[in-house]
Amino acid sequence: MNSAVLYARVSSKDQEQEGYSIPAQIKMLHEYARRKELSIVQEFVDVETAKARGRKRFGEMHDFLSRNPECRIVLVEKTDRLYRNFYDYLKLDELGIEIHLAKDGQIISPESKSQAKLTHEKASQGIYPSRPPLGYVNEVAEGSIVVHEQNSLVVKDLFSLYATGDHSMASVRKALFERHGKKYAKGYLHKLLKHRFYVGFFEWEKIVYRGTHETFIGPALFEQVQAVLEGHNRPKYRKHQFAFAGLLTCAHDGLTVTAEVKKAKYVYYHCTGYKGKCGLPYMKEEILGRQFGEVLKKIYVPDPVLKDVVASLRENEDKSVAERRETASLVERRLAALRRRMEQAYLDKLDGNITPDFWTRMQQDWQQEEMRLEQSLRTLGQPLDPRRLLDAERTLDSRIRRVLYTKCRIVMRRANC
């Protein structure tokens, strides 16, 4: 029976106290050793970060393996439990150690292909093992992926423009060319807009990893772009932008008043006429603008009312912050419960209470849910834009005392207005 050592790690004292890592790792690795007919001769447990050198028990394990050449096998739950920096990888690799990744069901041995080992290690460490998408570049010297200063500006503009819902893929392509002097295929831009690498995730060999690379696209912006791509809340794309589009209703038949361009320069409004010929005449946009201006001039908001509205806005802002905190707390509890469920299910698989196929199927669903919850936490963690309240106050305090959007849905009372 071949001898092996067991290595388990959690990243902080808090995780150890919560009790869903070390005991589960040790139980799983002993079960793995039993199935593989391996004898565990020593156990090493670290409760600290692996991002820096100097882990005490890891160092003791290295010394043990150096003194005992008959033991060449290390059992570990998964790669990031063992090492996250390349220095640790080299320390074990130079000893010719065979690494058994029990949770992944993989063995990394000296006979494995070097490129395959390095690729696996990079992915497990959160480093995309291939060429990154536009906006990033491989830093060969450091073996990492960094933000490309110029190309990242192109990607930022791509997301910002498309998120408005006012652009087609062709128009956003044209806008990028005008701003940056580069032409990109529409299909390529569409692919970039769906790339989760920009919010910290990547897929490698059908496994989704959380990357360590810096992100420059916010979660909220990314989700807004996905909503536009899926057609949710996406305004109808128009070649021309009309000032009063969607605000007017015909007094004769209650139909929408639409706009069109005549002689390539004049904008006219008229009833859609879906119910038959309508007596509402065609009206120039300039004339409507002057008439609406006269209406707005007569709208006055008294100062006491204005102060009450501003106070209400401030109160709503405070409530919004409190609600976000409460929601974030609920998401955190749900995420913790999900992780405990995943851990328990894995133990059930090891004990034979559930089948491996059922575990694999559920694990994929749970991982997707875990990433969705983490995404929600990042979104909720984004601070509210302080300009929202300021803009609202400025709008209400302006000289003409503009009314809210709903006040502008003017019904034309006269056919010759």
Image (spheres, rainbow, N blue to C red):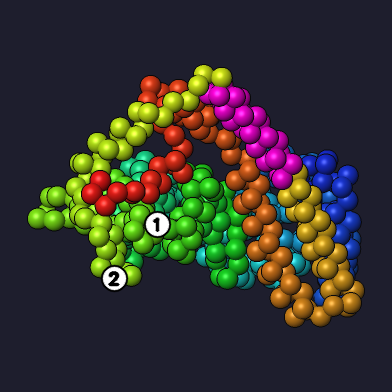
- Please tell me whether mark 2 sits on a helix, a strand or a loop: loop
Q: Is residue 220 visible?
A: yes
The residue at the point 27 percent across, 38 percent down is 291
Categorize mark 1 by other alpha carbons within 10 Å: few (<14), some (14-19), many (20+).
few
Which numbered disc, 2 or 1, marks the residue that appears first in the sequence?
1
Image quadrant where residue 1 sits: bottom right
Q: Which residue is mark 1?
A: 235
Q: Is residue 223 left or right of residue 262?
A: right
The correct choice, above or below, for 195 with respect to 241 in the image is: below
Which disc number belongs to residue 195?
Answer: none
Asked if residue 36 lies in the magenta stretch, the reply is no
Could you tell me the amino acid type at mark 1?
Answer: Pro
Q: Amino acid at mark 2?
A: Gly
Q: Identify the image quadrant of residue 285.
A: top left
* Residue 71 shows in this picture: no
How would you rate the neighbour count of disc 2 (Cα within 10 Å): few for under 14, some for 14-19, many for 20 or more? few
SS at mark 1?
loop
**Dominant secondary structure of the magenta stretch?**
helix
Magenta-tinted stretch: 305-328
Residue tagged 2: 276
Name the residue furthest left: 263
Q: Nearer the viewer, residue 391 or 185?
A: 391
Residue 318 magenta: yes
